[in-house]
Image (cartoon, rainbow, N blue to C red):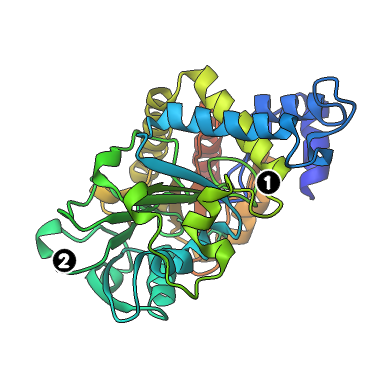
Amino acid sequence: MTYKSLHKLSAEQGGDVYNFGAGPAMLPAAVMQRARDEFIDWRGTGVSVMELGHRTKEFIAIAEQAEVDLRDLLKIPTNFTVLFMQGGATSQFSMVPLNLTAAGDSVDYLHTGLWSGKAKDEAGRYCQVNVAASSEDTGFTLIPATDRWQLDPQARYVYFTDNETVHGVEFQLTPDTGDVPLVADMTSNILSRPIDFSRYGLIFAGAQKNLGPAGLTVVIVREDLLDQARVDTPCLYNYAFNAKSQSMANTPPTYIWYMAGLVLQWVKAEGGIPVMEQRARLRSAKLYRAIDASGFYHNPVAPDARSRMNIPFSLTDDSLNETFLKEAMEHGLLALAGHRSVGGMRASLYNAMPETGVDKLIEFLTSFERRYG
Ligand SMILES: *Cc1c(COP(=O)(O)O)cnc(C)c1O
């Protein structure tokens, strides 16, 4: 069954479809409806947002409003610059070392899963990478205790992945790095809890998990770190260059920027970050409780490192995986397959996931266990 036929089916039956994909992920229904309503004719201009020039006053107003709303929601201080970039979160794996180090500099990485692993490997092409802590030997099922981190006070920055999307591991604390700038990949948990910017030098997030469709990356960088790029950094990879042109050095992904703006307006209308945080805690706690209460499903992550956003779990009998996924889909529960590198299942519960989606998933888990367990 395809997604398309399922959507049709569910509309005909009056049922709902829930997309648990890790990214690109589901967007709030209200955002999709608004985008549909404005699709062909944006506010009487006679054109779609995607047909507007990026230097028109109409698009610049859309772009500026998105920044205002992001700053407002996350309480971003004025000494931080917000950039709307392309290249996905992965391009930041090289931009961060290119902009913040010189050749020969040393940097600290906390290795807690697939994404921090990729980031540290990329940084290793530009500078000396010190793995200050790693949970690789446990299969990335915990955050190493802070008293065992080997942070180098001479490091140019400390890098970590706030939420490891594949392994389902999330930091419950902000690493204390003293005067060394802290850099965080918040791709899969931005907008789900407050951020204390006084503790950070740079935060980035690809949009397609919790912020909008794929194609945009938000970078929030402290001003004193903005203009330190190596001279041979490609200009589009240079933070200061992008800041000077208001993220419009070349044609930005205008429609995605607009969509992210709609998501930000939705988060505001729903009550902002405190409400998103409360919902995230509630949704994930419910699902972990159901998994832990069963003898049939298993989540391997230490309770104090469990992600509120991505919940991997396995079935006691792996040979049931395909049946599980097929039946889940027939129940309108989509994209529950785990990441190809770890297998099993994964339920992603981003801001757009209503609590009813989690309730439906738990109902299905229970009935599947009853029938096959
Ligand atoms: C998805 C993801 C990435 C990669 O994002 P791309 O936009 O595909 O480059 C990086 N980090 C984290 C934490 C992610 O969840």
Q: Position of residue 150 (x, y in %)?
A: 14, 68
Out of 84 and 303, give the one closest to the viewer: 84
Q: CA distance from mark 1 to mark 2?
A: 46 Å
Residue in front for this viewpoint, 100 or 170: 100
In the picture of the structure, the residue carrying the numbered disc 2 is 151
Foreground pick, 183 / 223: 223
Q: Quadrant of residue 30?
A: top right
Q: Residue at x 68, y 43 (%)?
A: 256
Q: Residue at x 42, y 71 (%)?
A: 230
Q: Height in image: 366 above or below 204?
A: above
Amino acid at the residue labelled 2: Leu
Please determine whether, in this image, residue 5 is positioned above or below residue 32: below
Q: Position of residue 316 (x, y in %)?
A: 43, 59
Residue 295 relative to residue 26: left or right: left
- Left or right of 118, for residue 195: left
Q: Nearer the viewer, mark 1 or mark 2?
A: 2
Identify the residue position indicated by label 1 in the image: 329
Q: Looking at the image, which residue is at 55% across and 67% down?
A: 340
Q: Quadrant of residue 105?
A: bottom left
Mark before the other along the chain sequence, 1 or 2:
2
Residue 174 picture location, percent across and down: 24, 46
